[in-house]
Image: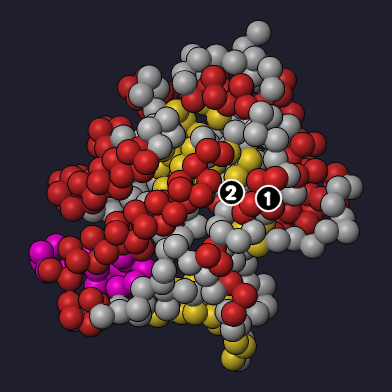
Amino acid sequence: MNSRKRVLQTINHKEPDRVPIDFGATMETTIHQDGYRKLKEKLGLCLDKPNVDMLKTAGFARVDEEVQRYIGADVRGIFPYPANRDTIEYRQDGDYSYFNDEFGILWRKPLKGGLYYDILSHPLAEKSLEEIMAYPFPNPADERRFAHIPDYLAQVDPLEYPMVFDNCFGNGIFQMSNQLMGYENFMMSMAMGEDKAGFLLDKIVDLKMQFWETVLDRFGDRIDVVKELDDMGTQANLWISPEMYQDLIKPRLVKLIRFIKNKKPDVKIMMHSCGSIFKIIPDLIDAGVDILNPVQYSAQGMDPVEIKRQFGNDLVIWGGGIDTQFTLPRGSVMQVKDETKRMLDIFMLGGGFVFAPVHAIQSDVPTENILAMWDTVKEFGRYS
């Protein structure tokens, strides 16, 4: 069974020959640049190739085809670029590097020992409704986002690998609004029922629909999974109440997913949402989500056994194969193997599970632990 058949069988809730592996098909299933350099050195692969950014702010690397083939990754990912990628000015001032993204958000990273960029200022903070309406949002259909994609697709055999199109245009409906207005400002605006909160949420949905219309018109025949994202959970609970989610976010997600599925009815919808989101998983299913990435089982209330029991027939679980906060970076090789096997035992029964860690592999993860994780999947992730 090749990778394409393996993944498609899995996401249709049937057991293939083994659990599929994802390494590098999405922003959340890849690896930090520093960790990737160490991995390439250990494997002796792609040493003459410079690392390519997948997500600059998080330090995530694009995984080379040679590395994906070596570890047996079954999925490939398509990533648009920010429209201003080639014109971004990275400025240094004091101990920091700064840049503005295409939405006008200002990011900052320490020059010494910095691993990630953090948001320093929000362009719509304290703005009025009229000012937000007049704001120059980026063009989702800008050709510069997609110009490199045909060449990449020409290198991937459509009969061998399924494709995920990762939404690298901003963030989720909720999180993009937070990033533009500032978390406190935006959530207070929602709680107070201000028109500007509703306008901004609707604007993000409209921009996303323009983006996906362009994507599906141009590349729809090669896309098996469309990935959206919205981190709705903290380590302990939801960012907002389930009632506020159902009132303000869910109807807009429903609108977006219906738009995508009207354009391409057979596409599967993946939703990335970190943290403690158990309370809204039924809402995600009701909205049309087919695939949940990940199950962050270190967060409160995210019992993997219960999630598989209650939702495993309706949702494919993509990621959640090992904890990336504690076990993968801090555990011994044996602890990594034991936990990987435990999660396989929970998630793989009946299909519907694509293996990846809970989130992208970070810079402090020992390479030995990464290899032990994949070796365990290959040994114990077989159905027959």
Q: Looking at the image, which residue sits at the far front?
A: 217
Question: Residue 88's x, y, as percent?
Answer: 58, 79
Residue 380 — which label?
none
Q: Which residue is mark 2?
A: 78
Q: Are marks 1 and 2 in contact (CB under 8 Å)?
A: yes
The image shows residue 23, relative to residue 188, as above or below, that is above
Between circles 1 and 2, the one closer to the viewer is 1
Q: Amino acid at mark 2?
A: Ile
Q: Tell me the magenta residue range.
A: 177-194
Mark 1 and mark 2: Cα distance apart in space = 8 Å
Q: Looking at the image, which residue sits at the far top?
A: 384
Q: Earlier in the sequence, mark 1 or mark 2?
A: 2
Q: Residues within 10 Å of mark 2 (few under 14, many from 20)?
A: many
At 64% across and 19% down in the image, what residue appears?
18
User: Observer-nearest residue: 10 or 43?
Assistant: 10
The part of the image, by quadrant, that contains residue 254 is: top left
Q: Amino acid at mark 1?
A: Tyr
Question: Residue 99's x, y, as percent?
Answer: 54, 80
Q: Which residue is mark 1?
A: 152
Secondary element under disc 1, as helix, strand or loop, is helix
Q: Is residue 67 visible?
A: yes
| Left/right of residue 316 with respect to residue 177 in the rendered view | right
Query: Does the magenta run of residues contain 112?
Result: no
The part of the image, by quadrant, that contains residue 37 is: bottom right
User: Observer-nearest residue: 373 or 206?
Assistant: 206
